[in-house]
Image (cartoon, rainbow, N blue to C red):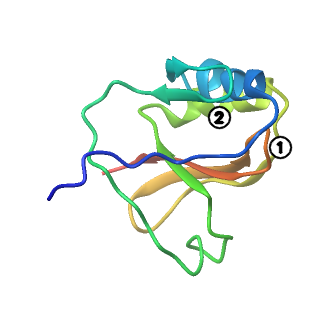
Amino acid sequence: MVVKRIVTNIAADNLDAAKAFYGDILGMKVVMDMGWIVTFDTKSKTTPQISIANEGGSGTKVPDISIEVDNLEDVYRSVLRAGFSIEYGPVTEEWGVRRFHVRDPFGRLVNILMHTN
C-alpha cells in the first residue's frame, strides 16, 4: 500500500475568499469546483507529507498548513497587498528555510516557506 495524496480540508462558508487567497495570491489552480467544495492543486510532482508537531519552530504556534513556494518575497508582497497581517517573519531559520506565517481568510495559520539551501 502506498499513500498517493494527502488533502487538507478546511471548513469555510466563503469559497470565493479561498479562490482569492489560494488561487490569486498563491497561484494555485482550481482543479475541482462542485459549489460546496473547491480543490486547488499546483500541478507539481510533490511527495505526500503530513507533519505532527508540538510547536511551529522558533517558539511559534503550530501552523495548520505549510506551503513551500519558489519565491517567498513575491508571495510576501502579494499577501501584504491583499491586506493580510503577517504573524511571524519573514525570517531565515537555522534549519535552512526562509518563511513567514499568515492567517488565511478562515483563520488558519499558514506557514509559507522557501528552502534556502
Q: Secondary structure at mark 2?
A: helix
Residue 3, by quadrant, is bottom left
Q: Residue at the location (55% across, 72% down)? A: 57
Q: Is residue 7 shown left or right of residue 65?
A: left
Q: Which residue is mark 1?
A: 85
Q: Give the crowd class for mark 2: few <14, some 14-19, many >=20 residues within 10 Å.
A: many
- Return the disc, 2 or 1, that comes first in the chain's sequence: 2
Using the image as rendered, state which of residue 73 and residue 66 is in the foreground. Answer: 66
The amino acid type of the residue labelled 1 equals: Ser
Give the x, y percent position of residue 58. Answer: 59, 74
**Residue pictured at 73% horizontal, 26% vertical:** 15
Residue ranking furthest to the bottom: 54
- Image quarter (top left, top right, bottom left or bottom right) of the N terminus: bottom left
Going by the image, does 74 lie left or right of 103?
left
Whether 117 is drawn above or below 37: the answer is below
Q: Is residue 107 left or right of residue 96?
A: right
Q: Which residue is mark 2?
A: 76
Give the residue type that dot 2 points to: Tyr
The residue that appears at 40% across and 67% down in the rendered structure is 95
